[in-house]
Image: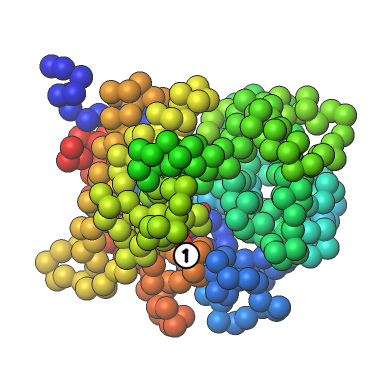
Amino acid sequence: MTVTESRIRFPDEFLFGGATAANQYEGGWNLEGKGPSIQDLMSHGILKGPDEKVNPANLKLDGVDGFHRFQEDIALMAEMGFQVYRFSVAWSRIFPTGMEEMPNEAGLAYYDQVIDACLSHNIEPLITISHYETPVGLSKQLDGFRSRETIDHYVRFARTLMERWKGKVRWWITFNEINALWNFPLMGAGIWTPKEQLSLADLYQTAHHEMVAAARVVQMAREIDSENKVGCMILGMANYARTCNPADEMAAMKEDERGLLFADVMMRGHYPAYALQRMKQEGITLATQPDDYETLKHTHDFLSFSYYMSKTIAHDPENYQSSAGNLVTGTTNPYLKSSQWGWQIDPTGLRWLLNKYWNRYEKPLFIVENGLGAVDEYCPDKDAAWTVNDQYRIDYLNDHLVQVWKAMHMDGVPVLGYTSWGCIDLISASSAEMKKRYGFVYVNRNQDGTGDMSRSRKKSFFWYRDVIASRGAVLKP
Ligand code: BGP
């Protein structure tokens, strides 16, 4: 049998699972001592600016009630055979303004239960320390990571979690999609000052603070427990040149540099030449402390990323139709179909990206977000166990997982695992919608906020269960 003919079989140590984020899943935005996070002020989603004060119409305030229903949800994950569950800890549940010296015990006690529920089902927790949910206090008073002071607050937050769950949690991610800073400084780095008022120097300085903070956490994680594995996490994007015109190739390469600066520093431990050159040309001098560059040498153990789509880059984008996309956009690719939200679906792009990251960093990779946001029709069938016939989601996930397998098996790329995004329906990040669903589990909550939040299994629930149980053998190449 040749390599290409082998049957799909993911190794036993490959972790299958799913992912959520506190601000999109939990709700309970002001319960048991939790302070407001910037997401509690984003009723229109992250593509629009924040509200002045909490708007009751913000669907994230109640999320999908994970705060009260996590036991049931984790049991459903166990039924699918999850080996890993990626979730974030709401920073303002632990430190209500982000700046307290002592943590909120009730917040920690909540996550004790979440973690214990995972472990009781043999599911490994994978914690995102910061997922677009900076406490409002930190954001308004310090402008988030624009201020160097925020590094210490973040490290204290991370230390609290790592010490509390030593021996229980060994997988950590420092920041969700840390490279979102360039386009969304509020969400990516908690900067309250409007983007239009920020200079390029402000953004580089903020990036530096975030990277130093992350490197300090890596160093600390190893001191606390040698079993800890800490991942850098970026918004993963396959940037293709729109044509083979060298000018387009050059534009695509430059776009890559923008998206990869964080990973370049956090995985390799130093600033790449292109970034130093850019800062020199722009007259930017970073404000640093003497040991910053030594600190940055504490590189992450693995690179994790989200992957939903690819995009094409042209040197003259005005001559093409622009594409919609996950926070960053390019021009359309005529070879690809799109989701209902206009994100271009490209399973091969995932294999391409896995190869690219492995070749660039030579460290293990973890796909921590991937999935199809779609409008689901709740339509229970009396002869079937599911309430939503989401064959389109099964097709999407099947095709992406096949490419992961190819990257591992045919290209030799080490991949640690795969956590499908929004494994339980939740509120979307970019547009704060309920109707954009990703889950294997349907949540009875409507776009207008009505619904009893009850859970039911979609067709994809049973499909994913079979994928995991067969280690991928049921996938259709
Ligand atoms: C990523 C975020 C997630 C998630 C996902 C899907 O950028 O890390 O939080 O929401 O995108 O995006 P959306 O919810 O807008 O469909």
User: Nearest the camera: 41 or 160?
Assistant: 41
Give the secondary structure at mark 1: loop
User: Nearest the camera: 91 or 124?
Assistant: 91
Question: Which quadrant would the N terminus be assigned to in this image?
Answer: top left
Question: Which quadrant would the C terminus be assigned to in this image?
Answer: top left
* Residue 335 vertical position relative to residue 362 in the rendered view, above or below: below
> From where the camera sits, is residue 30 visible?
yes
Residue 162 point in image, percent of width and height: 68, 39
Could you tell me which residue is drawn at 66 percent across and 28 percent down? Answer: 273
User: Horizontal placement of 401 versus 130: left or right?
Assistant: left
Q: Residues within 10 Å of mark 1 (few under 14, many from 20)?
A: many
Could you tell me which residue is drawn at 22 percent across and 30 percent down? Answer: 8
Could you tell me which residue is drawn at 37 percent across and 60 percent down? Answer: 321
The residue that mark 1 highlights is: 428
Q: Amino acid at mark 1?
A: Ser
**Does the Cβ of the disc 1 residue fall within 8 Å of ligand 1?**
yes
* Residue 386 vertical position relative to residue 407 in the rendered view, above or below: below
Residue 204 point in image, percent of width and height: 72, 45
Residue 39 point in image, percent of width and height: 62, 66
Could you tell me which residue is drawn at 46 percent across and 80 percent down? Answer: 449
User: Horizontal placement of 456 versus 204: left or right?
Assistant: left
User: Nearest the camera: 422 or 73?
Assistant: 422
* Residue 381 vertical position relative to residue 473 in the rendered view, above or below: below
> From where the camera sits, is residue 95 visible?
no
User: Horizontal placement of 111 versus 333: left or right?
Assistant: right
Figure quadrant of residue 246: top left
User: Horizontal placement of 224 versus 446: left or right?
Assistant: right
* Residue 162 vertical position relative to residue 327 in the rendered view, above or below: above
Figure quadrant of residue 417: top left
User: Nearest the camera: 3 or 28?
Assistant: 3
